Amino acid sequence: MGILDIFLLEALLNGILLGGVLALLSLGLNLIFGVIDVVWICYAELIMLGMYGMYFLYTVYGAPIVLAGLVCLVGVGILGVILHLLVIAPLLGAAPINQLLATGGVLFFLQSAATIMFGIEFRNLGLRLPILKLSGMFISYSRLLAFATALVGMVLVYLFLTRTYTGAAIRAIAQDRQIMVLMGVDSRRIYVITSALGGALAGLAACLLVLQYDVHPFVGLSFGPIIFLICVLGGLGNFVGGFVAAFVFAEIIALGGLYLDLEWGYVFAFAFFIVMMFIRPQGLMAKRS
Amino acid sequence: MTRAWPWLIGAALVVLPFVYRSPYPLHIMVIILIWSFAYTSWSVMGRFGLVSLGHGGFMGVGAYVTALLWNHGGVSPWLGIPLALLASGLLAVLVAYPCFRFRITGHYFALVTLALSGIVLQVITATRDFTGGSLGYTPERYQGGSSLFALQFSDKTTWYLIALAVWAGGLYVWHLVDRSMMRYALEAISEDEDAAAAAGVHVTAEKLKITVVSAMMTALAGALYGQYQMFISPDTVSGISISLQMVFAVVVGGVYVSLGPTVGAVITILLAEVLRISFGTRAVGWDNLVYGILLVLFIIFLPQGILGSLLDLGRRRAPALPRAAGSG
């Protein structure tokens, strides 16, 4: 019995740490969801590119890891702006589902571009952070680091949104995109800033994920769907909701993985999502017109 | 004369394998027909703005239920396929009914169904003791290799004719829907649900009907694919990438015309094959690269799809032509 409790505790703790990373992953997407009202289906693929960036800068070219991280952050942010200008901006007037499908095309494009350029081998940084032993539990430092950075990143974004003029404009546009234009806010500029911010958050997530996971062209498919579900479950554009949903999902996956298989953890998480959509649709309907 | 065209082309397609027996092109045509049918199944509901990303899940259910029943229970596909269709239909009701009841539409609906295809993929992978997991699954060969009872044929011509019949059936369903009252109801719903409900349309029931039809057709496509290829894996018949592939092909071909999905299948499969033949293993990834760019360009510049835009162009030009030329 005692040893089971240790495993349970370890799974719960790992769930919390995973939740922090998932919360960061969904934050960027949530921002874009909430402000531009667009689903970037290819969001996880941007993270994949960021992970490759980290791999090449740090492992192949030997750049210092902090510098590599900063370059990735800025680089993926720029990718976000390019994605917005090339794909989303021409479709802003079209049905929302068209924007979702167009970014689906970008998903195909980025995946296969990565396959062509980098091959399908699994790559990792070749960097192993030590493992923390805490009264019989094993917690990896890379997870702790990811969790801490995710929290700091989220606090910074929160401060940016609540304490700056641009942040206020972003929140205002998320509430009513017609009125804000009349109030003299340049919505195109806000959209570009939001896309850059969303992309930069994907870059930050990439830096943290690459510490724990191997990168390959299809890595996005393994966590992409989870991020979308977290955003929807939390309520689109609702940052606190997304934060809570990320931890609930992570615990379901961690506990499912403990008692059965990791795949069952995902099955339960997906099933939980569908059931929740029916039980608490008002959380989801809040932003619908 | 225009009325005779479909029959003439149909007859030519039936005769084709008896005249031209080269196995490779025949194989490509069977694959094209099966996928055309799957894409048509998607577009039956997709054309009404019900964008589902869960059809990879329905296809996986069709393929795996049929193969599992055959391998573990010795159930003939003649019984197994109807059971698989039933399972897929039930799954569709289970997910779609609450969706429609609680009015989850647009990209919310797309994301809920995305979760569905994720679930089917993960369940197949997780139950690897039965399904072979991500390594794939092979229906057991029936003694001689060809058998009507086991729905296994080593002869490509037989498969070609089966696929052709099923594809034609899919187009027939599309036309039935196109000419029914249901179409008007669903078009009204896709414009404005409240207005449609006020006008006396039973919104939930209409949407549910078309979803179940579409899901069962997709499951049939999955079962046929498994029986023809004699190998299925979670990545080739289920999951999110298959769902996106369906949407993509339909968008390229044209959602609003009956042959649009078929045109989409022909273009995407031929593109992949041409790249594979001319570049071999170096072509890995290039087909999806081209798809991806095309998908973005089509949604921005040609949302009607290739066939849809061509027909539109034809229609716009038609009045300029002398009347006599068009009659017949």
Image (cartoon, coloured by chain):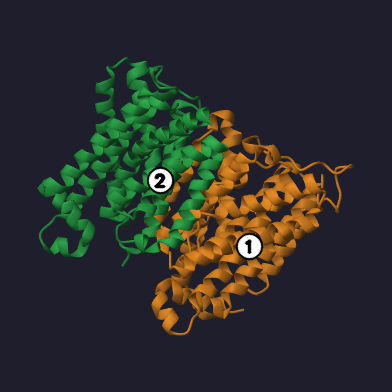
Residue B256 numbered tag: none
Q: Which chain comes out orange in the rendered image?
A: B
- Identify the image quadrant of residue B92: bottom right
Residue at (68%, 48%) from the top-left corner? B64
Cα gap from disc 1 to disc 2, whole angstroms:
30 Å
Q: Amino acid at mark 2?
A: Val
User: Label 2 belongs to which residue?
Assistant: A248
Q: Chain of mark 2?
A: A
Q: Which chain comes out green in the rendered image?
A: A
| Mark 1 nearby-residue class (10 Å; few <14, some 14–19, many ≥20) | many
Query: Left or right: where does residue B204 sit relative to residue A49?
Result: right
Question: Residue B181, position in %: x, y?
Answer: 55, 80
Image quadrant for the N terminus of chain B?
bottom right
Q: Amino acid at mark 1?
A: Gly
Question: Residue B65, position in %: x, y?
Answer: 70, 51
Residue at (50%, 58%) from the top-left corner? B52
Residue B89 numbered tag: 1
